[in-house]
Amino acid sequence: MNQSTQMSYHEFFSVLSCAILQELGTDYETYPVTNAKNNGIHRQGIVIRQKERKAAPAIYLDSYYQEYQSGKILSDILRHILYVYRESTTDSGKYSLEKIELTAEYMQSHLICTLVGYQKNEALLQGLPHIRLFDLAIYFKLLVYQNEEGIGTIRFTNQHFEQLLPMFATHDASKQLHMLYQLAIANTQRLFPFRFHTLRNMMEHMLGGAEPTRISLTSCADAKDSPLYVLTNASGIGGAACILYPGVLQYLQNYLTSDFFLIPSSIHELLIMPKHSNFSQEQLNDMISEINQTQVPAEDVLSNRSYRSEEWEEVLSLLSERADGLSYTMNE
């Protein structure tokens, strides 16, 4: 299709919306949605809602619009969107939000932590309770569902926090946020246990179609010859936050019997490199920056620098003690 004859995104959305309603009938409605993702990325989509239902899936259209611009037939795109919609609405677990009441009791057991870069997420973090560490930030989410296909979460806002404040009423604001963190990290560790394995082991199992296995202190000795290890969680989603889990840093130090670098591969995992490897921190930082620019999806980038295990030992000690050396932020 000639570029000059192609529809704009707005026109593309309007045509799809009309076709979807024509297919599904008058009991349905559609409307556009733009969601803020990690690192300032915004994704445009369409919500298809049966009018009698409170919850509805949002289907992101960015990739579909790119396919259209590349020449894919619009009717094929429509067919696939309707297939995705019907599949999603038959998965009752994903849209159990209709059945969930976000009570204080529910939030106490479903509050989890996530770790992101601070600078690119400053706008997102406004209105969200968060804690700053290095060039990173911890903020909170509520787990809505978890199944073999993935997880569903909603961001924990200051308004949600107000519902929990009676739990912390006798404490000052920074202590309240620290107690919220302690609650969230305990939930996160329980719901998403950490996984630590060699990069070689992970790649071999991925190629073989099996899950990587966690390394324990009794693993075979030759595993320690691997120069790179992977720290993530059981779901592989948001696994960089595992470094916050109580006991994990000590576990790594005991296993490796040395200090090490933490390399932010993405928000989903950290690479662990023993310090006896033949790289300086400056070399690692250069490689991380280049890889982030060329290989990591923009919304999955965590940081452009590596960290020394000694730095994390200090900051995790501050987190456990709620020292004033950390920035506890509710509103900015």
Image (cartoon, rainbow, N blue to C red):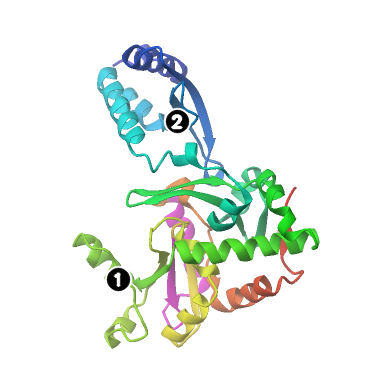
Is residue 148 highlighted in magenta?
no
Of badges 2 and 1, nearer the viewer stands: 2
| Residue 23 to residue 154: above or below | above
**Residue drawn at x 27%, y 23% as measured from the top left:** 79
- Residue 71 appears in which quarter of the rendering? top left
Estimate the x, y position of residue 47 in percent, counting from the top left.
Answer: 45, 26
Q: In the displayed structure, does residue 313 sit left or right of residue 86?
A: right
Q: In the displayed structure, does residue 202 sit left or right of residue 255?
A: left
Q: Nearer the viewer, residue 56 or 277?
A: 56
Q: Are marks 2 and 1 in contact (CB under 8 Å)?
A: no
Q: Which residues are magenta?
A: 269-293
Is residue 292 highlighted in magenta?
yes
Estimate the x, y position of residue 98 in percent, counting from the top left.
Answer: 48, 36
Residue 213 image label: 1
Residue 151 image label: none
**Residue 71 shows up from this direction:** no
Q: Secondary structure at mark 2?
A: loop
